[in-house]
Image: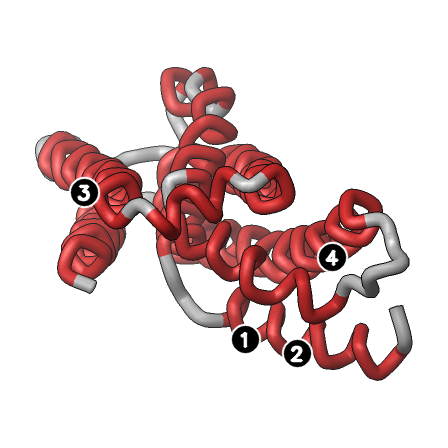
Amino acid sequence: MEQASILTYLAVVAMMVLTPGPNLAVILQSVAARGWRGGFGNLFGIAAAFYFHALCSVIGLTLVLRQAPALFTAVKALGAAYLIYLGAMNLRMAWRAAGRESAAAPTAAATHSTKGALFEGFMTNALNPKVGLFYLAIFPQYIDPNESVYAKSLLLVTIHASFAFGWYALLIVGFDRYRRRMGTSRSMVVAARLVIATVLIGLGLKVLIT
């Protein structure tokens, strides 16, 4: 891939990654609940889902999804429902935190559930059909007819995943430090939960209607 093409592709990827969306919302709620370990668990799941979407695009599953409106709508609805579910879970945790004197650093249960963060991240990204459609539209523009489709697709998705990993990693570390500095008072925990729940539910509803 020529340098100019790489820069152009990076610009497109950067716009996609830097725009706040479901991935960022899920990472923030995970850091709030589990600390930085939960955020990175989400991040590895999100990165894996990028490769999942790329594979689906290359073997033609995404094309089938695009040509079957009912199937596309069903996948989109599942993704929206999952975001709303995560939002509802944060509302429940805010309600529980409101009844405590404080909410110290991630609890033993929250830390133990860190392994579930990877699944959350993967599902959030995998159930977003727009990622697959993005690959379906953009990959052919950067793959020469004489090149291996699989090898070039692997390179393109790796660039995307690497950029996303670096950006979200910075946010995870920054948000975790902010969380620690602000302390673990009941009011702060409840407020953070409510904000994150509102964002997740709002994103879920937005996905449903767009």
Mark nearer the viewer, 4 or 1: 4
Q: Which residue is drawn at 38% across and 61% down?
A: 21
Residue 201 location (% of width, % of height): 17, 51
- The residue sitting at 62% across, 57% down in the picture is 164
Which circle marks residue 156 in the picture? 4
> Which residue type carries mark 4?
Leu
Residue of label 1 = 15
Badge nearest the viewer, 3 or 4: 4
What's the residue type where badge 1 is placed?
Answer: Met
Dot placed on the residue nearer the N-terminal end, 3 or 1: 1
Which of the two labelled residues, at mark 3 and mark 4, occupies the earlier sequence position?
Answer: 3
Callout 2–callout 3 Cβ contact below 8 Å: no
Q: Are marks 4 and 1 in contact (CB under 8 Å)?
A: no
Whether residue 184 is situated above or below residue 100 in the rendered picture: below
User: Nearer the N terminus, badge 4 or badge 1?
Assistant: 1
Mark 4 vs mark 1, CA separation in Å: 15 Å
Report which residue position mark 3 lands on.
84
- For disc 4, the neighbor class at 10 Å (few under 14, some 14 to 19, many from 20) is many
